[in-house]
Amino acid sequence: MEFLILKLMILIVDSGSTKCDWVAVDKDGNQTLEKMRTKGLNPAILPEKKLRKRIKKNKDLQNNRKDITHVFFYGAGCGTEKPNALLTKVLKDIFFNAEIHVHEDTMAAVYSTINHEEEQAVVCILGTGSNCSYFDGKEEHQKVKSLGYSIMDDASGNYYGRQLIRDYYFNHMPEDIRVAFSHKYNVSDDYIKYNLYKQGNPNAYLAAFAEFMFLNKESEYIQNLIKDGIRLFAKNMIMQFAEEVKTVPVHFAGSIAYFAQDEIKEVATEMGFKVGNIVRRPIEGLVSFHTSKL
């Protein structure tokens, strides 16, 4: 059955592994539906059935799916061919009248942080996961392919969650922090192992612990934990563009970056790069970017 579409309804989507923000706008950037949020849609981790279920669970998306004309999706796990193709198929099946465009989340970070379309910059993501790329004003470049939360993702939410749990179990936390941590979370070994090895999205589970750092930032232990993670990220990811950062800013996107701004600036001074823009959620910048293109 064909539907007559009289006007554009554009879905712009920014997804991490934990959560996914959806904004529907017309060609002038006017919001046509209330901003929506679903659970994260990482096709490198989630099977097709779960991807479909998470989208269809949102009633606004389900009820308006025939009216959607374009979907611009930026997400974690979309940087390689098979996961990208899987999510494209799922989106096309649901939003059957729409043009579907699926991109890696690094491009969302680029479009939401650069000051103008042709600005050159190193752009970092520090959220549930982490990544870094160089934007030359036209194209994005990466020298290191991300292998995900279990091997890489330095200074991400899941990195800090892992470090906090390790420090708790290895007795490296100061006693007051250790007590506060055990009061806030279920730290039984069986419960932690169940969530890490029996449940989906262990990266998002780990990332949930990162909130604890920002509630206890007055602690010297927490300050050092945050800065050590950022130093590791800067060494392994930012400094792969050592020549570029001599002349271009380093922008950041993501909740970890937003709440660790002071520590990022301190490490930047130590390591010799200039911090540019820091945005918590890229979605607003993406709306401006795409509507200017229509």
Image (spheres, rainbow, N blue to C red):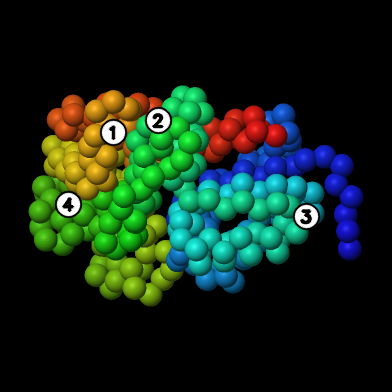
Amino acid bearing label 4:
Arg
* Mark 2 burial class by Cα count in 10 Å: few <14, some 14-19, many 20+: many
Q: Report if the CB atoms under discs 2 and 1 are less than 8 Å apart.
A: yes
Residue depicted at 15% across the width and 62% down the height: 169
- Image x and y of residue 115, in percent: 46, 24
Gap between marks 2 and 1 measured at Cα: 9 Å
Residue depicted at 82% across the width and 39% down the height: 7
25 relative to 276 in the view: left or right? right
Gap between marks 2 and 4 measured at Cα: 43 Å
Please identify, in this view, whether the residue under mark 4 or under mark 3 is nearer the observer: 3
Residue pointed to by mark 2: 120
Residue pointed to by mark 4: 178
Please identify, in this view, whether the residue under mark 1 or under mark 4 is nearer the observer: 1
Residue 244, numbered circle: 1
Q: Is residue 53 above or below residue 291?
A: below
Residue depicted at 51% across the width and 67% down the height: 82
**Of marks 2 and 3, which one's residue comes earlier in the chain?**
3
Disc 4 element? helix
Residue pointed to by mark 3: 97
Residue depicted at 70% across the width and 47% down the height: 70
Gap between marks 4 and 3 measured at Cα: 53 Å
**Of marks 2 and 1, which one's residue comes earlier in the chain?**
2
Q: Quadrant of the C terminus?
A: top right
**Of marks 2 and 4, which one's residue comes earlier in the chain?**
2
Q: Report if the CB atoms under discs 1 and 3 are less than 8 Å apart.
A: no
Amino acid bearing label 1:
Glu
Is there any visible trace of residue 265 in the rendered image? no
Gap between marks 1 and 3 measured at Cα: 42 Å
Q: Quadrant of the N terminus?
A: bottom right
